[in-house]
Amino acid sequence: MEDLYHNYLFTNTVQEGKPYTYNPDINGSFLVRNSRGEKASIDAEYVWVHFALNYFEDIGDGEIHIYGGFNDFTPDASTRMEYDSRLGNYKLKRLFKQGFYNYKYVLIKEDGTMDYGAIDGNFDKTENEYTVVVYYRAPGDRFDRVIGVGRGNAENITN
């Protein structure tokens, strides 16, 4: 018996160039949850999550990462996928606390720039959350002060 649970996700495919399909999500965030505990932050178990991605484009010295709020949208060694030549796809095994996680696949090119849409695509129809912070600097002041904060969701924003 293994010391931790293992969760094998379905193999993902490239969405770039395919028609947009609506998929409700939590905008890149995550929620630690479990069904039998009283306090998820301490009762939820850890699980090894196994990711697999069929991506057949040449990335040269680039890297493919999973990307999301679970690590503050910062790719690092723990999010880098490795190519498995035996299976012909990219793999990653990463430890997560039980819950619900939004993520996407990103390509970090050889020059260090991140291509957010190379794998999952870019769509203008997606629903997103926005935060607007309004600052004001009075004449002669040497600082800005926050005078307002607003939040909106793309489903509720109209012209």
Image: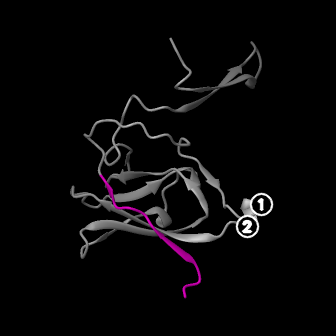
What is the basis of the colouring in this image?
Answer: one colour
Q: 62 above or below 102?
A: below
Please state the horizontal and vertical placement of residue 109, each as a whole percent of the image: 32, 52
**SS assignment at label 2:** helix
Q: Residues within 10 Å of mark 2 (few under 14, many from 20)?
A: some
Q: Amino acid at mark 2?
A: Asp
Q: Which mark is residue 70?
A: none
Q: Which residue is mark 1?
A: 39
Residue at the image position 54 percent from the left and 41 percent from the top: 27
- Residue 118 spot, x, y in % from top left: 31, 46
Q: Would residue 22 be found to the left or right of residue 26 on screen?
A: left
Mark 1 and mark 2 in contact? Answer it, CB < 8 Å.
Answer: yes
Q: Amino acid at mark 1?
A: Lys
Q: Which residues are magenta?
A: 1-13
Asked if the magenta segment contains residue 9, the reply would be yes
Q: Which residue is mark 2?
A: 43
Say above or below: 51 vs 125: below
In the rendered structure, the answer to whether residue 105 lies left or right of residue 84 reads: right
Q: Is residue 51 above or below residue 145?
A: below
